[in-house]
Image (cartoon, rainbow, N blue to C red):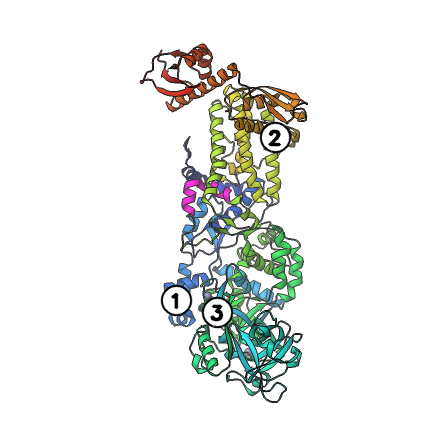
């Protein structure tokens, strides 16, 4: 068979079990046997195969395995198919490096065909590594038959969606200010920027610049002081803006006069030099001299270089006067649009200044230009002040390049028009943890800008919009057949550059061409529910059955990314929620709370951790962590090891005891009917365990369920088994049967969480099905659950703990029997049942329990050690030592032995007196005094009451 008896190495055993699952097609069978059952839908977000899987992926994969396994056992059909995210910047960046090129110009020089072919060839580079990891952690999923977002069928479904959204009037082309990466040469969407650590604290020099007021007003000759952290945007300055409600002042410093917000004036010593005070509104309309000559038309220039007012201006830093460059800021752009300002963009696609810029910065990169602008302004006497400022600055999450706001043409989905519906539909979604529902997710919905769905890149689904340059007519294509018909072209590939060459005859007589943009890959991942099935071209019925999904899971940052975009898509296309239950996890960090970094190697390699402790331990460790409630996990190998010891090892240890007690061939897992209090107690515990895990799992509370496992195994081992070993040894068959039944049921409950060890136990204990993963989820039998019994047992264990504490306080070991334990009458429920007394007496080694009202404390112990008690304690110690010697010598209880002893006078007399009793206890043929013999099978020397005692054992050959 696939498991060798006694093989305790978790990794070896788990690998054998993987082979068994593959060989016997257990996953496939688990689906087949539920084929006609109600479905449980689950969406798996497609990952990129451009990097190796890490703990974050293992975490997500584990939840996505635990929940479907559980639902399968509960009688649902849970289809599971792997998918790959194939398009977009992750692979484009890798290919640029591979081809040793950088930027759009060079990509176009080598050819989009070469570039995209290379992307296609490399996008699944690490697919095999992923496959190995997914298999090793025990995830049941159809990996071979995976869907890919680059498949024509997938793209066609995305096109269908775009056309539908277009038809609803929700797609528009706009120019919008977006954070832009000059290296990737594309804008980023708001949720890409919101993810993780896009912003870093940056120390920079901010400047205060003098803008001279034109002649012909009350303020002639004065300069407005405006503050900026981005001097490179000053050549694009087209306006200044003040807050109409704030107080501003005119101050005289030397020969110059300055305008500044009143409550900022003291920062520059201008509060002492005030000559006039007025409201911001009074400044509106003032004209000032432009800092630089820009190529504006007369009409454009007419509208520019004025003081405007807006209430977004704050006086928290700077001067209370903001410089406006509509091309380079979100507020700037909006304000510019309101006042009809032009958008003066002086950067090319790579973030370098173009020829229209002032000569001294032409060809320079945007950030490089800061120094030159400051120097040039200083030379002209226009720089009022420079100061160090620390502020958060955004960087590209893909390539790490500093981003800047840039106004570029782009396609949008109008989120504002559907926002109310998005908020309404959120009511129907259950979020785990629940605070996300009205917290992060709702807040995200409420503040969501329109969704920029276009990218100016290459390896992606192309935007299916064709446009006539002459008459501006547009056509959105929703299927391959439609495009073939309209273009008269056989469509061989939906990717660029092929698709760029496909033209459509316009009604005006000209040809329509595809717009150059491609589709944001988030549109693809949000289309996964229908695009995976090539809906609506195929699988119509299957898709309708899978919307909404019952369950999705990802880490918390996806709240504003994948979860959000799926919600948008589903609301627009189907007016439905995409999923009913969302489980979000936190982020896995290293022990010190740092982000896991492959280059820094600041965390244990997952493969090594799995090799050492097994995948079950890693799964249980992750599932019982608060990372399951959206909090960060500080990954600790020490805690992983503890999880291994307290769950897997302890359970296997319990199981191995069962195997020694159980008689060969007796496999009977019908309900046991033992009357023993410990059996009743463990059955109550077991059924409560089933009940609670079922309730928690039904409510997607994976972490509480996983934690119950450790708790249960602990009770099973440290109380039930510990207190039952003697009766099992003596052959209590009902007890042993109960024990087996409990382990058997435990294996089933653990199956979704720790699929390997449960399979091992289920198969070796004699489970009736081919695999534990083909068995049904156990049902809790509430007849067995006794709250009273559990409370009494808790009380009993509390008494035991207290007695042991008192003993250790006095320094009296447990093996030394004591005469009496007095328990206060108040603890009445223990009094009525002798069985509890017996448990307490055995566990604490006390002869007698009495109940009395008069004692002061709840529990009192008689610490007097009479000669009889002393002798009994010594005998216990001798018995323990003989058994130890026997064990060390590798002998079993079946080997016939003779015990020899020698040593001090007193102790020898005592042993001799009790020789018969000792022989019976240690199962020896005789206990005899003999000369010390170095050639015995095993021996030991100990000290008892200051005297030496030599103990030896010999095999009895007679
Ligand atoms: Zn970038
Ligand atoms: Zn036309």
Q: Residue furthest bottom?
A: 216
Q: Which residue in the protein does label 2 denote?
A: 794
User: Mark 2: few, some, or many residues within 10 Å (few <14, many ≥20)?
Assistant: few
Q: Which residue in the protein does label 1 denote?
A: 114
Q: CA distance from mark 2 to mark 3?
A: 63 Å
Q: Earlier in the sequence, mark 3 or mark 1?
A: 1
Q: Nearer the viewer, residue 22 or 636?
A: 636
Q: Is residue 945 above or below residue 788?
A: above
At a point 36% along the width and 16% down the height, the residue shown is 955
Q: Which residue in the protein does label 3 denote?
A: 204
- Secondary structure under tag 1 reads helix
Q: Quadrant of residue 942?
A: top left
At a point 58% along the width and 55% down the height, the residue shown is 540
Mark in front: 2 vs 1: 2
Q: What range is drawn magenta here? A: 605-621
**Per the image, is 750 magenta?**
no
**Per the image, is 611 magenta?**
yes
């Amino acid at each position: 068979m696939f498991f060798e008896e006694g093989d305790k190495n978790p990794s070896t055993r788990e690998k054998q079990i993987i082979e068994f699952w593959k060989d016997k097609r257990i996953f496939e069978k688990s689906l087949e046997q539920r084929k006609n059952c109600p479905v449980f839908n689950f969406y798996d977000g497609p990952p990129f195969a451009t990097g190796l899987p890490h703990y974050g992926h293992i975490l997500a994969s584990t939840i996505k395995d635990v929940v479907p396994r559980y639902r399968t056992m509960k009688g649902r059909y849970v289809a599971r198919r792997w998918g790959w995210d194939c398009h977009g910047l992750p692979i484009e960046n890798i290919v640029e490096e591979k081809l040793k090129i950088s930027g759009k110009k060079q990509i176009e020089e080598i050819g989009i065909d070469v570039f995209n072919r290379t992307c296609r060839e490399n996008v699944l580079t690490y697919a095999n590594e992923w496959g190995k990891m997914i298999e090793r952690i025990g995830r049941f999923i159809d990996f071979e038959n995976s869907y890919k977002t680059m498949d024509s069928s997938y793209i066609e479904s995305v096109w269908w969606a775009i056309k539908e959204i277009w038809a609803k009037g929700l797609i528009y082309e706009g120019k919008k200010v977006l954070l832009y990466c000059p290296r990737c040469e594309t804008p980023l969407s708001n949720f890409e920027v919101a993810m993780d650590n896009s912003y870093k604290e940056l120390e920079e020099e901010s400047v205060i610049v003098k803008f001279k007021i034109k002649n012909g007003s009350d303020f002639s000759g004065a300069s407005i002081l405006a503050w900026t952290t981005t001097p490179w945007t000053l050549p694009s300055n087209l306006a200044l803006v003040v807050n109409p409600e704030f107080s501003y002042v005119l101050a005289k410093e030397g020969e110059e006069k300055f305008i500044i917000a009143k409550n900022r004036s003291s920062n520059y010593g201008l509060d002492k030099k005030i000559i006039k005070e007025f409201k911001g509104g009074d400044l509106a309309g003032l004209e000032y001299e432009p800092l630089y000559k820009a190529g504006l038309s007369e009409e454009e220039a007419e509208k520019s270089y004025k003081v405007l007012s807006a209430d977004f201006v704050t006086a928290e830093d700077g001067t209370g006067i903001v410089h406006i460059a509509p091309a380079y800021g979100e507020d700037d752009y909006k304000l510019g649009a309101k006042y009809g300002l032009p958008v003066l963009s002086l950067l090319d696609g790579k973030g370098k200044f173009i020829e229209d810029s002032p000569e001294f910065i032409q060809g320079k990169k945007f950030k490089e230009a800061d120094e030159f602008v400051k120097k040039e302004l200083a030379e002209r006497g226009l720089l009022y002040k420079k100061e160090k400022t620390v502020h958060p600055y955004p960087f590209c999450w893909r390539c790490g390049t500093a981003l800047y706001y840039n106004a570029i043409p782009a396609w949008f989905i109008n989120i504002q028009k559907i926002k109310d519906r998005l908020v309404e539909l959120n009511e129907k979604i259950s979020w785990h943890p629940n605070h996300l529902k009205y917290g992060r997710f709702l807040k995200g919905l409420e503040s969501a800008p329109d969704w920029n769905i276009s990218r100016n890149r290459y390896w992606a689904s192309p935007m299916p919009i064709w446009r006539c340059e002459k008459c501006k007519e547009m056509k959105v294509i929703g299927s391959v057949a439609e495009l073939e018909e309209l273009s008269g072209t056989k469509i061989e590939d939906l990717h660029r550059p092929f698709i760029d060459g496909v033209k459509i005859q316009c009604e005006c007589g000209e040809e329509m061409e595809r717009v150059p943009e491609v589709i944001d890959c988030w549109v693809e991942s949000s289309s996964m529910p229908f695009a995976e099935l090539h809906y609506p071209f195929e699988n119509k019925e299957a898709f309708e059955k899978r919307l909404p999904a019952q369950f999705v899971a990802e880490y918390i940052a996806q709240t504003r990314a994948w979860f959000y975009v799926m919600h948008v898509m589903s609301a627009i296309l189907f007016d439905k929620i995409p999923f009913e239950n969302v489980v979000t996890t936190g982020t896995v960090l290293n022990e010190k709370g740092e982000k896991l970094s492959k280059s820094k190697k600041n965390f244990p390699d997952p493969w090594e951790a799995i090799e050492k402790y097994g995948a079950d331990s890693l799964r249980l460790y992750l599932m019982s962590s608060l990372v399951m409630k959206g909090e960060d996990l500080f990954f600790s190998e020490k805690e992983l090891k503890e999880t291994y010891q307290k769950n897997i090892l302890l359970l296997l240890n319990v199981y191995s005891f069962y195997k020694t007690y159980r008689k060969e061939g007796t496999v009977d897992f019908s309900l046991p009917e033992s009357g023993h209090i410990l059996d009743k107690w463990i059955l109550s515990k077991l059924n409560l365990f089933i009940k609670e895990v079922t309730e928690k799992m039904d409510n997607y509370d994976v972490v509480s369920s996983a934690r119950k496992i450790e708790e249960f195994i602990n009770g099973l081992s440290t109380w039930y088994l510990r207190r039952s070993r003697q009766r099992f040894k003596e052959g209590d068959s009902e007890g042993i049967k109960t024990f087996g039944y409990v382990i058997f049921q435990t294996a089933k409950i653990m199956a979704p969480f720790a699929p390997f060890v449960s399979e091992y136990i289920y198969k070796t204990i004699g489970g009736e099905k081919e695999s534990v993963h083909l068995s049904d989820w156990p049902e809790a039998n509430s007849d067995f659950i006794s709250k009273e019994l559990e409370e009494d047992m808790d009380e009993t264990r509390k008494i035991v703990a207290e007695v042991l504490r008192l003993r250790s306080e006095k320094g009296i070991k447990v093996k030394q029997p004591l005469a009496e334990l007095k328990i206060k009458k108040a603890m009445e429920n223990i009094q009525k049942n002798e069985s509890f007394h017996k448990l307490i007496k055995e566990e604490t080694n006390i002869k007698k329990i009495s109940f009395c009202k008069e004692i002061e404390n709840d529990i009192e112990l008689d610490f007097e050690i009479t000669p009889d008690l002393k002798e009994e304690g010594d005998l216990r110690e001798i018995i323990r030592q003989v058994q130890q010697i026997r064990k060390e010598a590798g002998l079993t209880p079946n080997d016939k032995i003779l015990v020899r002893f020698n040593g001090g006078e007193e102790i020898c007399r005592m042993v001799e007196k009790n020789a018969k009793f000792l022989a019976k206890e240690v199962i020896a043929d005789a206990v005899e005094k003999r000369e010390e013999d170095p050639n015995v099978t095993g021996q030991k020397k100990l000290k008892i009451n200051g005297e030496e005692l030599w103990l030896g054992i010999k095999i009895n050959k007679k």
